[in-house]
Amino acid sequence: METKRMIFVILISVLLSLSLPVRTDYVRPQPRKTLHFPREPKHPSLPHQVHISLAGENHMRISWITDDNSAPSIVEYGTLPGQYTFSSSGEATSYNYLFYSSGKIHHTVIGPLEHDTVYFYRCGGQGPEFQLKTPPGQFPVTFAVAGDLGQTGWTKSTLDHIDQCKYDVHLLPGDLSYADCMQHLWDNFGELVQPLASARPWMVTQGNHEKEKIPFFTDAFESYNARWKMPFEESESTSNLYYSFEVAGVHVIMLGSYTDYDELSDQYSWLKADLSKVDRKKTPWLVVLFHVPWYNSNHAHQGEGDGMMTAMEPLLYAAGVDLVFAGHVHAYERSKRVNKGKSDPCGTVHITIGDGGNREGLAQKYIHPTPEWSMFREASFGHGELKIVNSTHAFWSWHRNDDDEPVRSDQVWITSLIGSGCLAEKAYESSKILVSP
């Protein structure tokens, strides 16, 4: 077994050195050590790596893994502990990655569910009982936001702090496990986040560390797509790499920085169609997530989002997107409302939050002087909380992991574009851009 693992590590190193670019433009500080998870013996049919996600109106997708390929993809659930008045059957998949073979990966949709309600559930007809809480059906609603998590001591600190806040949905703009082709690290990550991800929906999009493509051997995003199925079909997308969903009065769009995004791409066409269907009377807030930031005053990853920004920013501006969250840069930054590279009162607030705790450390080198559009920037690990209070106002706060205590380091009240009157001004421009063929 050890010989196989050594061969695997050497093969991965060689192949990645041939296929991945090397960046030497900034130096990261020493991170905390990667966490280790000794595998405790479990019955092969018992569920592990349980996580949940929204799956269309009033429905939730329960995902888990078993080592027994004959285990059923059944979820039993109810509103009282141990009393399961409902059950649903789902689907299962698995994948092979060089010498690695995954367990049986189950995805089962349950519902319809009541808003703002605690449900108790178990997976596969046996094993431990889990509980989840559905999001509210109306304001206020709170999102926890953290990207580039990984599985280090800083990751654990971030997750502990998120667990202390009262949130309804977790948003993750890419770079989950930092497995980087070492597939057992996907399993470790699933165990690490299970306490939180089994209780509140985790809505994620892909980053560069999910790509894991090895030329001639594996396709890109194979592990990510198998393990973290998102509601792309429910939102009429053809790819798990981009989709949308609605919660309370918020329409959230998750985009892919690592799939085609030019005007001839499927993602661009889907985004244009999705934006054109948004009803701002029903969902007055419009939020977008992707991995590579468009507005970034850190030396790290400079210019990497320019192509996507050129193609898609006109759509987001015309639609009146209120907030964009990105990751990739391992630091925190918040902009003014911006468009076309400069301040614009009817533009979008961009927030980079790639500071969840990854093993690569922080990006500490910033461009000087500070661009006029940058309001706050700091290279520290942490997480964000977005509480949308009503149709016009939201409170954003960023919490630094300072000596393992969540210190609120940046906070601001944000007025929606509906509240500021900008959408009325954009109505004609929006109709030209979003409705035109």
Image (cartoon, rainbow, N blue to C red):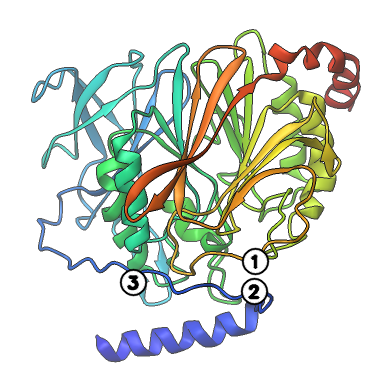
Label 2 Cα neighbours within 10 Å, binned few <14 / some 14-19 / many ≥20: some
> What residue is at 83 percent from the left and 31 percent from the top?
344
> What residue is at 31 percent from the left and 49 percent from the top?
193
Classify mark 3: helix, strand or loop: loop
Nearer the N terminus, badge 2 or badge 1? 2
In this rendering, would 185 be left or right of 231? left
**Quadrant of residue 85 within the rendered picture:** top left
- The residue lying toward the viewer, choosing from 24 and 244, is 24
**Residue 195, percent across and down?**
24, 44
In this rendering, would 58 be left or right of 394? left
- The residue lying toward the viewer, choosing from 118 and 422, is 422
Q: Mark 3 sits on what residue?
A: 33
- The residue lying toward the viewer, choosing from 304 and 401, is 401
Nearer the N terminus, badge 1 or badge 3? 3
Residue type pointed to by label 3? Lys
3D distance between C-alphas at marks 1 and 3: 22 Å
3D distance between C-alphas at marks 2 and 1: 7 Å
In this rendering, would 308 be left or right of 349? right
Q: Mark 1 sits on what residue?
A: 365
Q: Nearest to the eye among marks 1 and 3: give it.
A: 1
Residue type pointed to by label 1? Lys
**Quadrant of residue 23 within the rendered picture:** bottom right
Q: Given contact means CB atoms under 8 Å apart, are the residues at marks 2 and 1 in contact? A: yes
**Quadrant of residue 149 within the rendered picture:** bottom left
Classify mark 2: helix, strand or loop: loop
Classify mark 1: helix, strand or loop: loop
Image vertical order of residue 391 relative to residue 240, above or below: above
Image vertical order of residue 393 relative to residue 125, above or below: above
Nearer the N terminus, badge 2 or badge 3? 2
> What residue is at 38 percent from the left and 53 percent from the top?
402
Q: Mark 2 sits on what residue?
A: 26
